[in-house]
Amino acid sequence: MKKITILSLLFVALLFQACSKKEESSQANAVMVNKNEFVLTGLNNKQYIVAKGKDGYSVEGAQGKVVIFDIFATWCPPCRATAAHLTTLKKQFGKDLLVIGVSIEDAIPNEKLQEFRKKYNAQYALVNSPQNRRLVNSMASFLKLGNNFPIPIMAIYKDGKLVKHYLGLVEEEFVASDIKRALGK
């Protein structure tokens, strides 16, 4: 009986070791500067370097701009509705606003994101990166949302400081008001 128990424990330990090795190797393939930086690649192959600070998240090269992270999934009806609102806001605020759509779907093909962009008029940066999930989990933790959070999540930052975040579908006018306030308008 002891031999069976020991063999079972050894098998389980090896199984978990194999899973962690696989996870480490997939993370090794992702570009990682440090634990507080995330390198995200957009559909147009543009890279966005996101840094986590004590007050929130900032994007390299976006100083003085309002940055909205839209955490979404292509299959989510409220996320689909949010896409058109974000496009309208992007047009309204122009260069003062950077919108980055971060999909929670692991290994989603770029074609599916392109289809989402076209069908739901998501005319802003959509990122499809091995670090998407890492960033989403980090933001959810920062916003104290727990492990099972709803989507979409819209987190608004200015110069690395959290302005406001929303869960679920939100009226475009509320978001526009927060952007104006962040820009001092």
Image (cartoon, grey):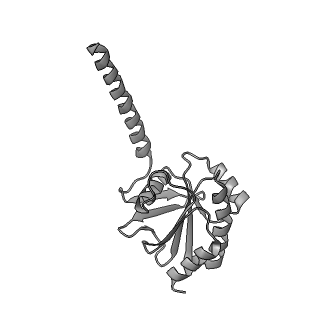
Q: Residue at x 45, y 60 (%)?
A: 139
Q: Residue at x 61, y 68 (%)?
A: 170
In the displayed structure image, the side of residue 166 where residue 38 appears, left or right: left
135 lies above or below 58: above
Give the residue at the far right of this rendering. Answer: 119
Q: What x and y, as percent, mark residue 21?
A: 38, 36
Q: Which residue occupies the foreground of this view, 12 or 63?
A: 12
**Residue 35 appearing in the image:** yes
175 lies above or below 127: below
21 lies above or below 38: above
Q: What x and y, as percent, mark residue 173?
A: 63, 76
- Disc tally is 0
Q: What x and y, as percent, mark residue 63?
A: 46, 76
Q: Residue at x 64, y 72 (%)?
A: 172
Quarter containing the N terminus: top left
Quarter containing the C terminus: bottom right
Give the residue at the far bottom of this rendering. Answer: 185
**Residue 156 appearing in the image:** no
Which corner quadrant of the image does residue 60 belong to? bottom left
